[in-house]
């Protein structure tokens, strides 16, 4: 039988339709399946699904999702959760994830330590579909004593980093955060301050190289990314420029013995006057000395027993209570107690520090102390990544202070603190080398002229919407009350204490004018004039805005400041 050319065409087309419908079937598959197949197609090391991919119906999904979520608000019903959690086992998997997410048109969110204050590394406050890249399996740390440097993969915590450094040397350390469970991945993207900042600056000031997967899926290091890109990732905030794989850090010298203390004062013992005095001296002390103040209400009958105790745990919901404000001065001094006592006698005698208050120890032991872990916690605990405190829901805000806050305003704070169950404020001194580093050296702009940073926190246990709203309303009112006493035009904030009250970017379309106006509000608050340069770098390295979230750096040209 003769087959006409037209019937061949028909047969061919039928075949084609078959083929097409087969590929339709493939695209009909869930995002999870498509992402998984794409990743395997794009990597040489094939990955068993069960080891690295977790969908919401997997038994282990919620435990992985919750494991390191610090703010339990990220678990709220109203938040969008990931369609899939992918835990890369090799750097090339991260590259594949970027390429596959682009191909499939799905957003990526990256989580390292999960300490984002608004939980946006793992959840979204808007309706959105995304895959979460969980870096927890990429956490190697290679300390090199020969060059006083270390490479650390971004899935590691800062506690692990500190431990690995101390394992190799008792006289080297790294100047980053106080809470050991914070992830080095997100931490250094926002600055990273801690008790050695007055001597050595921020963690981000001590980054000497980095490896990042950019929006095209390439792995770049400092020399291939160039100095502008390298500038932006050290302080410009997480989740805007790429996925960091590893940091190379400069280690700093620490003495074999350091000294710590905690001395508390309540209102009855002159706490208000003392805090005013501390504000005058804290940024002018010897740069080896860092004294922060934790402020919280306590039961006044307890105060005799609390001179050396800091409570950050729970207080119950009583009605009328005899409460007072406790101010706890917690310090690290990079030296021995005798020198510390001399400095205190000369510069801050009002605290009344005595020999018995001082505890000498190694730097790594001071990490446990400053983290407020119980005194006998072994340093190996830093490797476990667990926290001794129960997690809660919280809302926090930050403020920068240029002039001491007067006593009558401090009394206004106390009044507001008595309205709540478990409010906390942490006052951190600046000065020292922080005043000597230029405010555009890296995107973190809070340098010369900054006396103190205050962090305001309100915590609560799982509760209903109404209770949540009450707490959030309380901290917003406190923030309003503080307006006259803190930085202005713009009112500055620390990007690592992310606060979505400052504005949310329209994720889909950041060219949208009102959305860009929003970014113009929070951008300069976090970065001052550096915001403009961040937008410039963003446009260059991620013009299609692949890496984005509620407060990522926008690409729009409309952004102007000043
Ligand atoms: C209990 C607690 C204590 C803290 N103490 C301090 C402190 O002492 N000093 C201080 O400076 N800060 C402190 N912080 C704030 C902390 O620095 C920030 O929350 C930081 O962003 C956390 O990093 P992470 O990796 O743990 O968080 P994540 O939630 O994993 O990430 C935070 C942000 O960075 C992005 N990100 C994460 N990993 C990567 C990556 N590999 N590449 C690119 N982007 C990434 C995320 O998408 C997200 O936007 C503390 C926070 C908490 C909850
Ligand atoms: C796979 O391995 C080959 C040979 O080593 C290499 O050329 C190729 O780039 C690799 N592909 C991926 C996606 O890693
Ligand atoms: C997750 O679910 C998939 C099926 O959707 C299954 O193949 C896989 O083994 C599960 N993984 C785990 C860790 O439970
Ligand atoms: C540390 O060294 C090992 C072995 O050479 C290597 O596989 C790993 O990637 C290194 N880690 C970092 C963060 O450089
Ligand atoms: C490393 O640090 C130590 C201690 O500060 C110092 O003595 C040494 O010279 C440094 N080595 C290099 C190569 O910088
Ligand atoms: C404080 O006092 C209240 C009521 O008097 C009590 O219920 C609560 O347990 C006390 N808190 C602490 C930490 O002692
Ligand atoms: C507060 O303290 C006073 C004096 O110590 C005591 O008489 C009073 O009963 C206390 N009130 C409460 C509510 O505990
Ligand atoms: C932490 O939570 C557990 C279980 O809810 C509780 O038993 C324990 O007392 C809490 N610990 C602290 C320090 O609040
Ligand atoms: C623009 O962004 C604002 C703020 O995020 C949003 O309210 C508005 O709906 C957006 N408009 C358009 C047209 O997308």
Image (cartoon, rainbow, N blue to C red):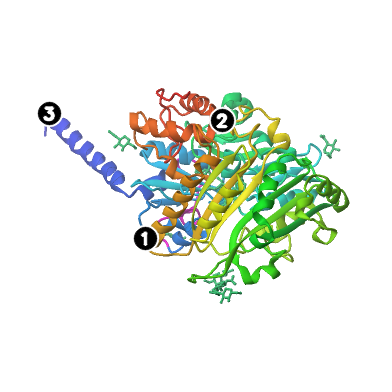
Q: Quadrant of ligand 2?
A: top right
Instruction: Determine the residue positioned at 38% across, 48% down.
Output: 125
Left or right for 250, reference 68: right
Mark 3–mark 2 distance (CA, rounded to whole Å): 61 Å
Question: How far across and down, in percent of the image, does residue 417 sit?
Answer: 53, 58
Could you tell me residue 354's position as x and y percent? 83, 58
Residue at mark 2: 232
Earlier along the polypeptide chain: callout 3 or callout 1? 3
Label placed on residue 506: none
Name the residue: 41% across, 56% down.
Answer: 55
Q: Relative to residue 226, is residue 390 depicted above or below?
A: below
- The residue closer to the viewer here, 144 or 23, is 144
Residue toward you, 127 or 220: 127
Where is residue 410 drawn, in percent x and y? 58, 50
Number of numbered markers: 3
Q: Was residue 15 drawn as part of the magenta stretch in this picture?
A: no
* CA distance for labels 2 and 1: 38 Å
> Quick check: 560 above or below 114?
above
Q: Nearer the viewer, mark 2 or mark 1?
A: 1
Q: Earlier in the sequence, mark 3 or mark 2?
A: 3
User: Quadrant of residue 328 in the image?
Assistant: bottom right
- Residue at 21% x, 38% y is 17
Residue identified by numbered label 1: 465
Tell me the magenta residue range: 39-58
Q: Earlier in the sequence, mark 2 or mark 1?
A: 2
Which residue in the protein does label 3 denote? 6
Q: Is residue 48 magenta?
A: yes
């Amino acid at each position: 039988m003769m087959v006409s050319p037209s019937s061949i065409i028909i047969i061919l087309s039928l075949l084609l339709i078959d083929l097409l419908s087969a590929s339709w079937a493939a695209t009909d598959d869930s995002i999870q399946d498509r992402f998984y197949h794409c990743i395997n197609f794009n990597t040489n090391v094939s990955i068993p699904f069960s080891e690295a991919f977790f969908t919401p119906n997997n038994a282990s999904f919620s435990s992985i999702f919750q494991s390191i979520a610090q703010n339990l608000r990220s678990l709220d019903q109203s938040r969008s959760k990931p369609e899939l959690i992918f835990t890369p086992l090799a750097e090339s998997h991260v590259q594949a994830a970027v390429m596959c997410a682009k191909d499939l048109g799905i957003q990526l969110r990256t989580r390292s330590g999960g300490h984002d204050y608004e939980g946006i590394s793992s959840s979204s406050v808007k309706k959105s579909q995304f895959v979460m890249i969980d870096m927890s399996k990429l956490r190697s740390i290679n300390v090199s004593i020969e060059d006083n440097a270390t490479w650390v993969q971004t899935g590691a915590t800062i506690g692990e980093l500190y431990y690995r450094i101390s394992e190799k040397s008792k006289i080297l350390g790294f100047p980053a955060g106080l809470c050991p469970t914070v992830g080095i991945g997100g931490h250094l993207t926002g600055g990273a301050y801690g008790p050695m900042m007055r001597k050595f600056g921020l963690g981000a000031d001590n980054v000497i190289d980095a490896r990042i997967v950019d929006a095209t899926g390439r792995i770049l290091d400092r020399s291939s990314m160039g100095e502008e890109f390298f500038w932006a990732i050290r302080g410009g905030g997480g989740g805007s420029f790429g996925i960091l794989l590893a940091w190379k850090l400069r280690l700093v010298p620490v003495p074999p013995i350091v000294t710590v203390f905690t001395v508390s004062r309540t209102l009855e013992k002159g706490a208000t006057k003392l805090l005013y005095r501390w504000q005058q001296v804290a940024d002018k002390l010897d740069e080896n000395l860092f004294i922060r103040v934790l402020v919280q209400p306590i039961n006044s009958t307890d105060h005799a027993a609390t001179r050396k105790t800091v409570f950050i745990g729970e207080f119950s919901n009583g009605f009328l209570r005899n409460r007072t404000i406790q101010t706890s001065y917690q310090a690290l001094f990079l030296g021995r107690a005798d020198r510390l006592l001399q400095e205190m006698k000369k510069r801050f005698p009002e605290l009344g520090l005595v020999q018995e208050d001082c505890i000498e120890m190694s730097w790594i032991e001071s990490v446990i102390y400053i983290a407020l872990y119980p005194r006998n916690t072994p340093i190996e605990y830093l490797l476990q990544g667990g926290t001794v405190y129960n997690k809660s829901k919280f809302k926090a805000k930050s403020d920068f202070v240029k002039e001491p806050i007067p006593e009558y305003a401090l009394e206004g704070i106390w009044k507001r603190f008595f309205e709540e169950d478990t409010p906390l404020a942490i006052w951190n001194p600046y000065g020292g080398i922080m005043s000597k580093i230029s405010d555009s050296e890296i995107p973190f702009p809070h340098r010369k002229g900054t006396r103190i940073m205050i962090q305001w926190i309100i915590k609560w246990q799982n509760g209903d919407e109404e209770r949540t709203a009450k707490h959030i309303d309380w901290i917003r009112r406190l923030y309003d009350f503080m307006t006259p006493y803190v930085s202005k035009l713009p009112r500055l904030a620390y990007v690592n204490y992310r606060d979505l009250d400052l504005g949310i970017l329209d994720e889909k379309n950041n060219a949208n004018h009102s959305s860009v106006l929003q970014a113009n509000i929070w951008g300069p608050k976090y970065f001052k004039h550096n915001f403009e340069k961040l937008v410039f770098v963003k446009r260059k390295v991620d013009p299609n805005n692949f890496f984005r979230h509620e407060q990522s750096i926008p690409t729009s040209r409309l952004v102007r400041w000043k």
